[in-house]
Amino acid sequence: MANLLFDKYSYDVVVNDQSLRNYIFLNDLKYPNSYRRTSKKDFSKAKINIIERLENALMRGGTGGKIGGHVIRTKGRLQGKKLKVMHIIEDAFEQIHEKTNQNPLQVFIQAVENSAPIEDTTRVRYGGIISNIAVDISASRRLDYALRNISIATILASFGKKMTMRDALANELILASRNDPNGYAIKRRNEIERMARSAK
């Protein structure tokens, strides 16, 4: 019998984005944690459960740099605290289930698909002239972008405010799954793609 995520939610979900289908890995574990045993192998993160990749993205260190116009100095408050992050995700999924009455894993997959940009810009040098050109993004990098923007949105929404990380994560995933431009991850995707279009 297949396991349920957090002993509650089915892994029977649909991935509509063809390019992301090979990188969204959903092995049916109750509490996904691989201890990153295969970290030395090439492309090993493609075989890590997508929920564990979200956990890893949320365990950001506080760089003290500006993100979205805000200075974030979390001093790595969640660094290495995987169990704590796992419980934050579990609570957020419970909230999503209560608000939407859907499988929160399906909501999360839709949020990731909607948050992943298709085009980006890169700098190239022709002689002494440096210019930006539009390039397509690989599926692996698209997924990295989506997870990073969702985790940054969660940290920004809960940083120095009364909103908890659980509430911030649930809110961001619901907005992203609906392709709502008020969500940070969707804003960032639109901004990246707009810059790419202008560089063509």
Image (cartoon, helix red, strand yellow):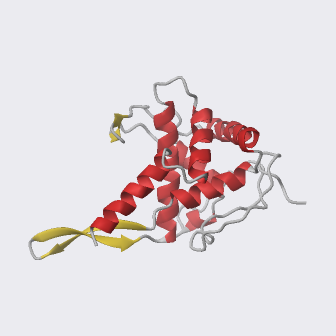
The percent coordinates of residue 120 (x first, y second) are: 36, 65
Compare residues 18 and 7 and report the one nearer the observer: 18
Question: Which quarter of the figure has residue 73?
Answer: top left
Q: Position of residue 109 (x, y in %)?
A: 64, 57
- Residue drawn where x is 51% and y is 31% of the image: 158
Say which residue appears at 31% left-offset and 61% top-offset: 195
In front of the other: 80 or 108 = 108
In x, y percent, where is residue 127? 10, 76
Q: Is residue 18 above or below residue 108?
A: below
Q: Quadrant of residue 26?
A: bottom right
Furthest residue in direction top, as rendered: 162
Please give the name of the residue rendered at 77% of the width and 58% of the height, measured from the top-left corner.
11
Question: Farthest residue toward the left?
Answer: 128
Query: Is 80 in front, or is 92?
Result: 92
Does residue 62 lie above or below 144 as drawn? above
Q: Residue at x 60, y 74 (%)?
A: 18
User: Relative to 174, is 159 on the left or the right?
Assistant: left
The answer to whether residue 123 is left or right of residue 47 is left
Q: Position of residue 179 (x, y in %)?
A: 55, 54
- Does residue 112 sit above or below 199 in this rendering? above
Query: Where the N terminus falls, by quadrant?
Result: bottom right
Q: Quadrant of residue 128?
A: bottom left
How many numbered marks does the figure carry? Answer: 0
